[in-house]
Image: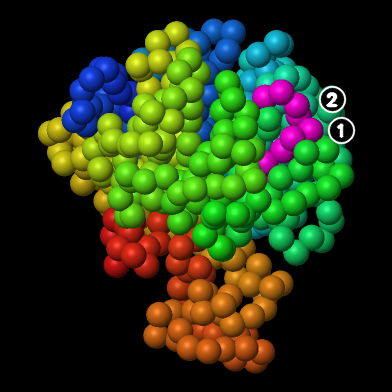
Amino acid sequence: MVSLRAERMVRRALVVFVVVLVAGMAAAQPWTPLGPDGGDVRALAYDPQDPQRIFLGTSAGQLFLSSDAGASWARVAHLGEGDDYVLDHILINPQDGTLYVSAWSVEQPTGDIFRSRDGGRTWQALAAMHGRSVRSLAMAQSDPRVLVAGALDGVFRSNDAGNTWQRISPEGHAEIKNIESLALDPRSPDIVYAGTWHLPWKTSDGGLTWRSIKQGVIDDSDVFSIIVDHSRPSVVYVSACSGIYKSESAGELFRKVQGIPYSARRTRVLHQDPRNPNIVYAGTTEGLWKTADAGQTWRRVSSANLIVNDVLVDPRSPSRLLVATEPRLCAPAGSVAGGGPRGQQRALRRPDQRQGIWRRLRLARRRALVAAAHQRPGPARCLRAAPVADRRAAGGDQCRRLHERARERGVAAAQHRADAGDQDAAGGIAPWGVA
């Protein structure tokens, strides 16, 4: 049972911003804070049968619902036994309204996929996926009964709305694991793109064969988000720790898009406008960016001090966006995007909150990466997992000692992989209160 103090912390750890973008305006737009006060929203989803209904998932297992387009919110479920589940993806079947939520634990390498057939009133953990740390979840546009899940141990598929699941990636594969992102071709659910903590992969035959699609992508890039153009499926966008890439050949060759500053290139989410395929939004560690010409040019359409986890485009009015953000970078007190009065800004910086959800997210990321490094020993892995002062040639026992030293000092593994908030090697942003 979650304590009263934990409950209060969770309610403080929720914020959604809505922005109305006016065509032709080049400056950052004003943002209006909506919903429960606080900070760490991980996922948003419109009900396709009733866009007034919006579901919101948090990093503490809380699921909220707004029935009035975000004007008010009510908690409808707590998923998981504790408060350690991160709800990263919410999907809704457009035909029958069935909801799916993927979850992973910040404490252990475990997780679940939850399903509700009654609008979110009751939930069932799908037995076949119980215990898997599910980091990504996708639904086939051509057949919503087909679901594909990405977990730390591979890619899995259901052809019957989640009743049964089969592994479609090779078991024990050295590279097709730690699946951070997924996308399905809108024409065929057998064409699956999978982004790992290393590079992107693709299958065109439902998982019978896989191939690396890294040509043009900087080696060893975490792939945070993948989208396939709904009007031209040969166009694929990928966001990675090294930047945003675009392919016009269904992943055969990528080129890096230009126009977003290096410090903002940690892009957690890409989202395409449902009506205009030339408009793509990029949610980064330095605000929300937009291209209106299919990636040729980009401009920031929010304050630079927003960290964006998810983006929704109102299907009735694409000029209206909902953006899920994190609490550590709020605008100055008194501004429209500030999320509350000065007292609330101070409250968000209290030590107990700094060391709560954020600390657990970083610890989970660190543990998983150190485990992955031990599975793939080598000098490069050692150097990324070790403190800056210990970046020297290493191998064998020296590798093990460096990992142990990194854990003892609380140093996050792989600086460019720590998307939960560690300092970026090229001047990225650390969470508030953390040096």
The answer to if 405 sits in the magenta stretch is no
Secondary structure, mark 1, is loop
- Tell me how the rendering is colored: rainbow
Type of the residue with mark 2? Asp
Type of the residue with mark 1? Thr
User: In this rendering, is residue 50 above or below 7?
Assistant: above
Residue 210 picture location, percent across and down: 78, 49
Residue, disc 1:
164
Secondary structure, mark 2, is loop
Residue 319 picture location, percent across and down: 35, 16
Question: Residue placed at 31% from the left, 40% from the top?
Answer: 287
Residue 116 picture location, percent across and down: 70, 22
User: In this rendering, is residue 171 above or below 412?
Assistant: above
The residues colored magenta run: 186-195
Residue 294 picture location, percent across and down: 43, 31
- From the image, which quarter does the C terminus lie in? bottom left
